[in-house]
Image: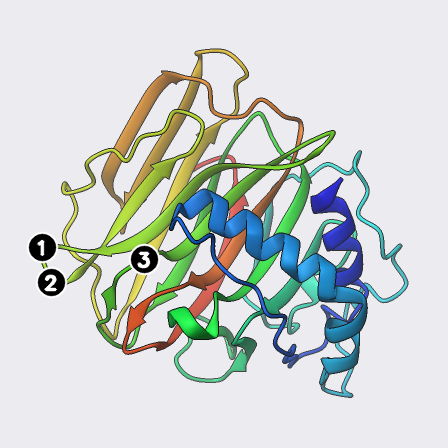
């Protein structure tokens, strides 16, 4: 499977190093501008270049970290279950150790640990992308993967230091399912401008049902402050699924009675994926990422 092969290569290049910068992979968005196709194309391009560019360009910090997953099997386990889980990056990126996790950067992008800003503890993760058409898609993300719970809450604290004008995709969460012939996009939480170049607000896109529900019940995201994104995801192959999105505890979207996941094994991406921002360089900070069974 595409997702499994990509995860195998990326997990093997040191997801547990405290600071990792991965070189340019030359990922390009789909010319038609479709968000789902662009993410799929970028993933394919990353996989094609992975054996050469990824392994050659890794610049890992030599320092190890407690709880390292270096001894774990590099290949993701299609039968591994993902339960309640959290990371505040206090052990670097070790909580994303294989086979149930990895971190990567593709295109003009990088990720690292920072000591400021942080939401709690000593560290947070910084994800940086250059998002301009000629430079290609920039994506820097950490991924938790496996057989997910039938219903759970997925949350993370984000800090966006500056406004930007998004002319394409500015993605924070991406959830992908796995099927025998590859990966399939399920849903996104992204940022979009209100009006023409107005403030940024959260946006949920449901790939399976082809809809972008109104999320105006919450205000634009606060710039230069930590804010919390949380999604309740009830997986269902029939019309009994639920997707609910909150920002700082205020409900933005509540979708019920729909197919939410036709697969068993999946991936949850946290970080940044961007293809057309003004200004083009964008960094988001992430802390206290969690999967839980109570809000």
Q: What residue lies at 79% left-to-right and 37% top-to-bottom?
A: 78
In space, the residues marked 2 and 3 are separated at their CA atoms by 15 Å
Q: What residue lies at 51% left-to-right and 79% top-to-bottom?
A: 122
Q: Secondary structure at mark 3?
A: loop
Q: Give the colour scheme shown.
A: rainbow
Q: Is residue 196 left or right of residue 102?
A: left
Q: Residues within 10 Å of mark 2 (few under 14, many from 20)?
A: some
Q: Is residue 261 above or below residue 95?
A: above
| Residue 197 rendering spot, x and y as whole percentages | 13, 64
Quarter of the figure with residue 217: top left
**Along the line of sight, the residue nearer the viewer: 18 or 165:** 165
| Mark toward the start of the polypeptide (1 vs 3) | 3
Q: CB of mark 2 within 8 Å of CB of mark 1? A: yes
Quarter of the figure with residue 207: top left
| Mark toward the start of the polypeptide (2 vs 3) | 3
Disc 3: which residue: 168
The disc label shown at residue 77, or none:
none
Disc 2: which residue: 198
Q: Secondary structure at mark 2?
A: loop
Q: Is residue 229 above or below residue 182?
A: below
Disc 1: which residue: 195
| Residue 293 rendering spot, x and y as whole percentages | 51, 35
- The outermost residue toward the bottom is 62
**Along the line of sight, the residue nearer the viewer: 56 or 11:** 56
């Amino acid at each position: 499977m595409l997702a499994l092969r990509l995860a195998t290569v990326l997990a093997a290049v040191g997801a547990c190093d405290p600071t990792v910068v991965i070189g340019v992979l030359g990922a390009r968005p789909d010319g038609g501008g479709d968000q789902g196709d662009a993410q799929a194309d970028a993933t394919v391009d990353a996989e094609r270049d992975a054996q050469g560019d990824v392994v050659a360009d890794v610049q890992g910090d030599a320092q190890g970290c407690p709880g390292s997953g270096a001894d774990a099997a590099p290949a993701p386990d299609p039968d591994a279950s993902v339960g309640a889980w959290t990371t505040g990056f206090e052990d670097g990126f070790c909580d994303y150790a294989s086979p149930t996790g990895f971190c990567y950067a593709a295109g003009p992008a990088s990720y690292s640990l920072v000591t400021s800003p942080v939401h709690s503890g000593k560290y947070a993760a910084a994800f940086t992308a250059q998002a301009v058409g000629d430079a290609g898609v920039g994506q820097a993300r950490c991924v938790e993967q496996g057989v997910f719970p039938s219903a759970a809450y997925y949350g993370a604290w984000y800090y966006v230091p500056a406004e930007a004008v998004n002319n394409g995709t500015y993605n924070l969460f991406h959830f992908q399912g796995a099927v025998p012939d590859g990966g399939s996009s399920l849903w996104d939480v992204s940022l979009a401008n209100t009006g023409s170049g107005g403030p940024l607000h959260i946006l949920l896109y449901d790939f399976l049902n082809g809809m972008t529900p109104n999320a105006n019940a919450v205000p634009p995201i606060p710039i230069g402050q930590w804010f919390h994104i949380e999604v309740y995801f009830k997986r269902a192959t029939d019309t009994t699924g639920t997707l609910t999105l909150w920002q700082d505890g205020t409900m933005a979207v509540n979708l019920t009675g729909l197919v939410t996941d036709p697969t068993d094994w999946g991936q949850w991406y946290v970080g940044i994926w961007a293809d057309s921002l003004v200004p083009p360089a964008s960094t988001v900070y992430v802390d206290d990422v969690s999967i839980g069974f109570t809000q």
